[in-house]
């Protein structure tokens, strides 16, 4: 800006000198030459200055380097099935260091999940005014239980975000607070609550978020549609893998949460979309080109919800005057002599084994019955497409020692089957619910259409960045706020 002001001043002085020379030069030829030079100088200055301010205006409209999204908004109404998701098209993730403070900007995304609440604060830098942003660092924290556990204490639930917000203030430079966008998206836990309970929780949460000096997005603290969750997870994984530039080599993503599970991939065969139900696909914009994704969220098939159903429990069990659950749940998936407490949402249970019926066969039968109730759609392409499995898929694979906790790795679907057989045959396992979880994951993967020999990749991070739908959602948020 200072350079342009200096240039404008030079232009003005030049034009003035030209006018003076014209007035006091008596020779006609010289007058004509001076006049011509003065006019050319004036026109050139006008063109350059006008062009500069037009470009400056354009650059301001792309403050973060994200291309604007189309007019289609992502669904925050979980009853909406079809999602037209336009995610920012020009982000390039690299690990960069030693950038100046002036280049930095941030985005805050809260994940209000069924089993816990998490904050992701992403730090981006730009090398020049017109360059694309680069992701350089992330603050990640989580608290338990999830927001849905405070269904009867909405104020207390909202206050659970305060420690994470305080840490975000410490991590983000103070001068960046007013320009840092913040959003909170709730997932399956709140989708399963009655509408009035969910509304109260979200209203109180908005009040807490509004008391902090960040830039709240429109409709902050809302329930995210399950298909949105799947699309964001797919975008995050493929972005971190560097595959969005070569979309034909993208990978599919399966996300196993507490209350729901999603499967999302880019079909290579048109027949996949033709055969899929209409509410089983959405669209995403990648580098200016629209792609149709196969994506669906199965509400109720998250690991925690499935556990409860396998054991015969209901989301809202009757309680006595002491607020204790009167039901005792039992399952053949639990060790035969096991009895212990179990909490789902805001409800406490007593769970126990079933003695002689314990074992892999009985447990597998129970988990398959739960999966069958949901009548999963089986797309043919899952048999040949590479897939990443995240969230509870990864956690239980680590517990079963199928992959390393830090490095992850590739596993076969049959490896879950074999691990389940081994764990379920142990009458005194270290984790009493691991037999149930592994049997359920095996049943779910088979229900989706995976063969025992199919390989899936399990990782927690890619390039030291946490795998979560929140990064894809942050790209979208920054695109809308630019």
Image (cartoon, rainbow, N blue to C red):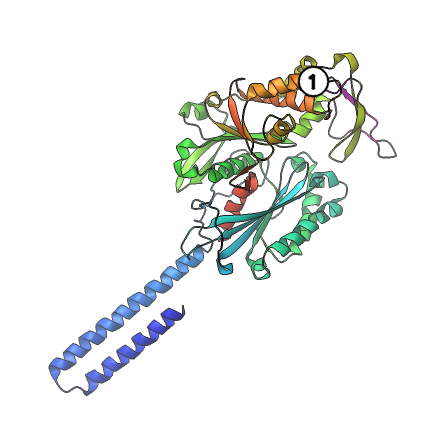
On screen, residue 382 versus residue 79, left or right, reads left
On screen, residue 38 versus residue 255, left or right, reads left
Check residue 319 for magenta coloring.
yes
Region rendered in magenta? 315-336
Q: Position of residue 461 (x, y in %)?
A: 55, 38
**Circle 1 sits on which residue?**
424
In the rendered image of this protein, does residue 442 appear above or below residue 204? Answer: above
For image coordinates 65% across by 52% down, the residue present is 167
Question: Given the current orientation, which residue lies at the most extreme right position?
Answer: 321
Q: Position of residue 225 (x, y in %)?
A: 58, 37
The picture quadrant where one finds residue 81 is top right
In the rendered image of this protein, does residue 5 appear above or below residue 98? Answer: below
For image coordinates 40% across by 55% down, the residue present is 130
Check residue 325 for magenta coloring.
yes
Q: Position of residue 420 (x, y in %)?
A: 65, 19
On screen, residue 28 versus residue 353, left or right, reads left
Which quadrant: the N terminus? bottom left
Given residues 395 and 35, the one toward you in this image is 395
For image coordinates 64% across by 22% down, the residue present is 438
Q: Position of residue 240 (x, y in %)?
A: 48, 40
């Amino acid at each position: 800006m200072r350079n342009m002001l200096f240039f404008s001043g030079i232009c003005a002085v030049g034009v003035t000198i030209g006018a003076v020379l014209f007035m006091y030069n008596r020779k006609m030829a010289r007058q004509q030459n001076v006049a011509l030079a003065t006019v050319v100088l004036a026109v050139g200055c006008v063109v350059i200055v006008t062009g500069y301010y037009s470009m400056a205006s354009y650059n301001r409209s792309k403050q973060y380097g994200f291309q604007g999204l189309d007019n289609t908004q992502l669904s925050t109404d979980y009853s909406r099935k079809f999602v037209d998701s336009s995610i920012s098209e020009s982000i390039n993730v690299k690990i960069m260091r030693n950038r100046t403070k002036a280049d930095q900007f941030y985005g805050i995304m809260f994940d209000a999940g069924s089993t816990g609440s998490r904050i992701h604060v992403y730090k981006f830098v730009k090398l020049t005014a017109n360059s694309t942003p680069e992701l350089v660092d992330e603050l990640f924290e989580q608290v338990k239980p999830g927001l849905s556990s405070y269904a009867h204490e909405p104020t207390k639930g909202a206050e659970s975000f305060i420690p994470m917000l305080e840490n975000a203030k410490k991590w983000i430079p103070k001068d960046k607070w007013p320009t840092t966008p913040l959003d909170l998206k709730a997932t399956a836990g709140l989708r399963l609550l009655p509408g009035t309970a969910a509304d109260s929780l979200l209203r109180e949460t908005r009040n807490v978020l509004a008391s902090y000096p960040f830039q709240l997005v429109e409709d902050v603290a809302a329930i995210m549609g399950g298909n949105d969750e799947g699309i964001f997870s797919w975008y995050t994984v493929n972005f971190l893998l560097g595959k969005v530039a070569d979309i034909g080599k993208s990978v599919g993503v399966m996300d196993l949460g507490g209350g729901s599970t999603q499967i999302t991939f880019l079909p290579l065969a048109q027949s996949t979309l033709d055969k899929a139900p209409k509410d089983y696909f959405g669209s995403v914009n990648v580098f200016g080109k629209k792609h149709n994704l196969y994506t669906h969220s199965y509400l109720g098939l998250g690991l925690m919800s499935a556990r409860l159903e396998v054991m015969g429990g209901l989301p809202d069990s009757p309680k006595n005057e002491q607020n204790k659950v009167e039901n005792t749940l039992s399952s053949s998936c639990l060790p035969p002599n096991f009895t212990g407490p179990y909490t789902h949402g805001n409800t406490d249970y007593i769970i126990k084994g079933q003695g002689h019926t314990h074992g892999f066969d009985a447990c597998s039968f129970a988990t398959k019955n739960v999966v069958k109730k949901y009548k999963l759609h089986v797309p043919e392409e899952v048999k040949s497409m590479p897939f990443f499995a995240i969230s509870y898929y990864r956690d239980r694979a680590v517990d079963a020692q199928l992959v390393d906790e830090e490095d992850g790795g590739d596993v076969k679907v049959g490896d879950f089957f074999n691990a389940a057989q081994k764990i379920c045959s142990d009458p005194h396992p270290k984790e009493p619910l691991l037999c149930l979880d592994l049997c359920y994951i095996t049943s779910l993967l088979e229900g989706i259409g995976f063969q025992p020999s199919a390989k899936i990749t399990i990782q927690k991070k890619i390039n030291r960045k946490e795998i979560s739908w929140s990064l894809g959602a942050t790209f979208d948020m920054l695109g809308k706020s630019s």
